[in-house]
């Protein structure tokens, strides 16, 4: 079986078969990271294209997202290692106005697998709630996710609010999400940008000097 079947499974939101398809791939020896990237994530990219071209509407996009989530949940234990040592503390959330969470959840999952203690503050997180969380949890790293062009400015707002609260210097800020770029990260004064979950782990390790 090729991963194109798994791509089609996500696109068609074939929830009943997603686990079976992933299991077959795992049994055939396919690398879990390849199943995630070339199967599940690729499927979401096709869904995005269909949405953009007007062939899909919100219900289809949502159904595909739920299928992807079920797939990720099933694949989870194969994707992440298990580490008991705490590599550092990270707060992760999706910025205000934005409810996309699949990418953020993957980042959380991979960071946890790499031994980070992660507080996931959820989606559509108000700026003041990020500030509050940094104050309360005192993390070494704050991760901000944004999937919409029009919510990207919230990243800048959060960074400004942390400065205002005198907290900016005590936390490294990493950002990501499909429309986010390194250039944007540099512009808004974030400490780093990662294009995917594995990159987020590498960045977080770098922040911690590992
Ligand atoms: Co939305 N949506 N959506 N959507 N959606 C996109 C993002 C879009 C590109 C689709 C398109 O038009 N092609 C488009 C945004 C255009 C833009 O602004 N540039 C879009 C739109 C327009 C919208 C709505 C406005 C549609 C509407 O209502 N008219 C609406 C907005 C709702 C809101 O947030 N206020 C909306 C709604 C939704 C659903 C709810 C239906 C659903 C989300 C369900 C959910 O998340 N629970 C949804 C989905 C599924 C998508 C697409 C199809 C898939 C997103 C996804 O999960 N990708 C998406 C198209 C696309 O991206 N191809 C689209 C898979 C995921 C693993 O990748 O999230 O990029 P991603 O995460 C990656 C990296 O980016 C990175 O690592 C992850 C793992 O590799 N990363 C980080 C992410 N966060 C990071 C943080 C880091 C580091 C790395 O550090 C902290």
Image: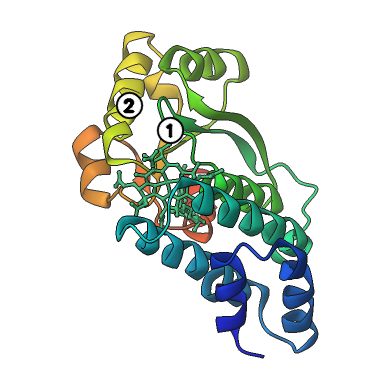
- 156, above or below 191, in the image: above
Residue drawn where x is 57% and y is 27% of the image: 139
Helix, strand or loop at mark 1 = loop
Residue 8 x %, y %: 56, 74
| Alpha carbons under labels 2 and 1: distance apart | 10 Å
Residue 182: percent from the left, percent from the top?
Answer: 27, 51
Q: Are marks 2 and 1 in contact (CB under 8 Å)?
A: yes
- The disc at residue 192 is none
Of tags 2 and 1, which is closer to the observer? 1
Residue beneath the point at 60% across and 45% down = 105
Q: Quadrant of residue 7?
A: bottom right
The kind of secondary structure element at disc 2 is: helix
Residue 205 visible: no
Q: Which mark is residue 98?
A: 1
Q: Nearer the viewer, residue 40 or 126?
A: 40
Q: Please indicate, yes or no, whether residue 165 appears anywhere in the rendered image.
A: yes
* Mark 2 lies on residue: 154
Residue 38 position in % (x across, y down): 52, 76
Q: Quadrant of residue 26?
A: bottom right
């Amino acid at each position: 079986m090729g991963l194109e079947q798994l791509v089609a499974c996500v696109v068609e939101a074939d929830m009943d078969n997603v686990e079976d398809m992933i299991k077959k791939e795992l049994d055939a020896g396919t690398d879990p990271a390849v199943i995630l990237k070339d199967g599940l994530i690729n499927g979401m990219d096709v869904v995005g294209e269909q949405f953009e071209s007007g062939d899909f509407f919100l219900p289809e996009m949502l159904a595909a997202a739920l299928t992807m989530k079920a797939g990720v949940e099933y694949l989870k234990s194969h994707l992440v290692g298990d580490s008991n040592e705490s590599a550092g503390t990270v707060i992760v959330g999706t910025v205000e106005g934005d409810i996309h969470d699949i990418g953020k959840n993957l980042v959380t999952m991979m960071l946890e697998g790499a031994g980070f203690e992660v507080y996931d503050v959820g989606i559509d997180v108000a700026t003041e709630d990020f500030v509050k969380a940094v104050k309360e949890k005192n993390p070494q790293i704050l991760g901000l996710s944004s999937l919409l062009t029009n919510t990207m400015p919230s990243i800048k707002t959060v960074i400004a609010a942390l400065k205002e609260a005198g907290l900016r210097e005590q936390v490294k800020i990493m950002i990501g999400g499909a429309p986010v770029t390194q250039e944007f990260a540099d512009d808004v004064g974030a400490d780093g940008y990662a294009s995917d979950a594995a990159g987020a782990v590498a960045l977080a390790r770098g922040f911690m000097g590992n």
